[in-house]
Image (cartoon, rainbow, N blue to C red):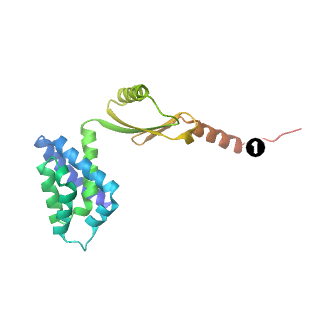
Amino acid sequence: MVEDRIGFRYAKSIFDLAKEKDMLAEVHADMAFLHEVCITSPDFVRVLESPIISSDKKNAILKAVAGEHMKSDMTKLLLTQIVRKSRERYLDNMAKAFVELYDVENHISHATLISASPLSDEQVKEITEKLAKQTGDKIDLIVEVDEKLIGGFVLKLGDQLFDGSVASGLRKLRQEFGDTSFQRKY
């Protein structure tokens, strides 16, 4: 999509500048915050996308929402510039692309582990260490519980999915037995 490309170009530019100025961590915190705001507040995104709302009001809204959370003057300047150039509708794409660039630069992988029952801290730590060893990246692991799995787990790592749940095993067995031409012969 065009929005993704435009967002990526802005993110790459600000990423390179932040890296050059040794401000990656601060700008990353700002961009992660902005991305989270865009995800959790669809009204905020609609305001940014609205052609009816003036750029002055959008600037004021951005300052009100992000002002005290911004750690970097570079991010504050970026926000002012994107509103001035009428690119505020790409803010979420920029923030998301920046966070992805930061993760690649710092070898951070995101994973989600869904288990049928709660895991102990020791189990989570062991899984995180094994994933880190296997991938060579730092692992940001989100742990969720879904009792519908019956037992086992589902692990999402990047674009890979490892399904070791009992529910999945039962589904596979149901498909195998449903597709056979087995007939009883008395």
User: In the rendered view of the protein, which quadrant contains the N terminus?
Assistant: bottom left
On screen, 111 above or below 45?
A: above
Nearest to the observer: residue 84 or residue 39: 39
On screen, 153 above or below 42?
A: above
Q: Residues within 10 Å of mark 1 (few under 14, many from 20)?
A: few
- On screen, residue 182 versus residue 52, left or right, reads right
- Residue shown at 27%/70% (left/top)? 50
Is residue 166 among the parts visible in the rendering? yes
- Residue shown at 43%/27% (left/top)? 123
> In which image quadrant can residue 128 be found?
top left
> In which image quadrant can residue 124 be found?
top left
On screen, 144 above or below 4?
A: above
Q: Which residue is mark 1?
A: 181
> In which image quadrant can residue 165 be found?
top right
Q: Residue furthest right?
A: 186
- Residue shown at 25%/52% (left/top)? 34
Is residue 179 among the parts visible in the rendering? no
